[in-house]
Amino acid sequence: MAADAGGLPEEGLALWLTEWKVSTKIPWPGRHLVASVGRSVAGQLDYFLHPDGQAIKVAMLRVHPDFQRRGVAGVLMDALYAAHPTAWINHGWRTGDGARWWNGYREPDPGRNVHNRPPAEWAAYFDAVDVASDKAHIAHQNERYGLHGHRDVAYRYGERLESEAGLYAAAFRPVTPVRVDPGAQPLHGGLRLVLPPAVHAFVHDRTQEAGARAAALLEHLGHGNLPRDAHWNTSAQAAFADTHHQELFESRSPGPPATHVVFTLAPLDASAVSAADALATSVEFTQPGDVAVDVTRMSWRPADRPYLTHTAALTPAVPAAIAPLSAPSASAAYRSRYDESGFLRPAARAGGRPFTDRAAQIQAMAERLLRGQASRTRTPRPKPAPPQTATPRPPAPEQRPPAPGRRP
């Protein structure tokens, strides 16, 4: 999106819509709408979307101090209306700063704001009493700060506010939360890694075998160190979105770009399922202990070139584990298989997997492979030998036809 008149930088504003994985009393899926300028987050709008897509509850709108008063909040709110062109929108109550901002904002479609319409039209989506309470709070903020607050378009209750809202409280239709079943489908979890230069070069070298590169990544991380604080999603795309979100909001040190890795797990067994906190499209492991899993596929990409995605199917699946919260909380099976750093113990390495000596040996192997490849490209090709002239054969003797009356 090009820079607007509010003074945005020349590189303009990029908008990105992704899932907001949060477990609250609102059983609607969460969404993030993030605005970024270059690699910096300029603002974010968090909201909940009704499962049928026809109602929105805004949770928070915030802009980074470096980008305030430059039109970012208005762009985010306009984008929300554009992304859901037919949905009812409940903006909730407002802080003092929010009330002052709203006073200068021009709503794209006031007719979809539940504060501007009677409860009979939207009461199936929102509790009319809660909406009435939010409106009373906003009216107080407007009076306190001397704001108009677009009160001309706000719906005026025919009866006392409490009475009319109470009439429609029974019309509200609660939503039954949808929970993913981690024992019935694969799960995908993302992780952001900053690799040593040689390892980074090796795992992104498409001339090398994909399985060996996946093994190098897993050995560098440690089989017992699969991400604990990640949400495990029902799609690999959502897992990559998590890593991108992490990339936006985390500081980056100088060096090679980060590598975004997604691990695909086989459906979990009963003991692991009981330890998972399930949301609509993802699960999170909240118990302090480790979780034994089987990795069936790995995908990875450089953060600065997400279109270059590498994939390796692991056949058979590789046993691994989601890391425990602390060493004392690890199970006996985890401690027997992994050391205190989450790497495979020697006894668990039967079968001879590639890159089994962890970080130092992985880097040495990667450097050796890359040096060999570089030397092959530098070696001049031998000149082709001159073509040899074929020696002419003597002509075959002339064969005469047989004499008449005799068989040949």
Image (cartoon, grey):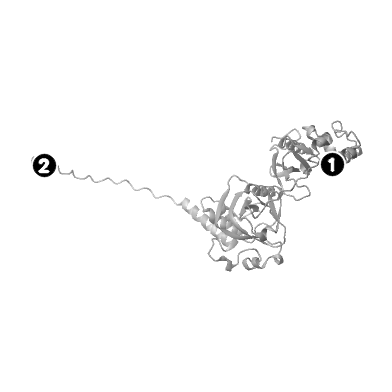
327 w.r.t. 183: above or below: below
Q: Nearer the viewer, residue 74 or 229?
A: 229
Q: Quadrant of residue 160?
A: top right
Assess disc 2: are there few (<14), some (14-19) or many (≥20) residues with their C-alpha within 10 Å of its C-alpha.
few
The image position of residue 133, as x and y in percent, is 87, 42
Q: Residue furthest top?
A: 152
327 w.r.t. 250: above or below: below
* Residue 173 visible to the viewer: yes
- Mark 2 lies on residue: 402
- Mark 1 lies on residue: 169
Q: Nearer the viewer, residue 297 or 203?
A: 297
The image position of residue 90, as x and y in percent, is 80, 39
What secondary structure is marked by label 2?
loop
Assess disc 1: are there few (<14), some (14-19) or many (≥20) residues with their C-alpha within 10 Å of its C-alpha.
some
Residue 382 numbered mark, or none: none
Q: Is residue 190 left or right of residue 373?
A: right
Q: Quadrant of residue 142?
A: top right
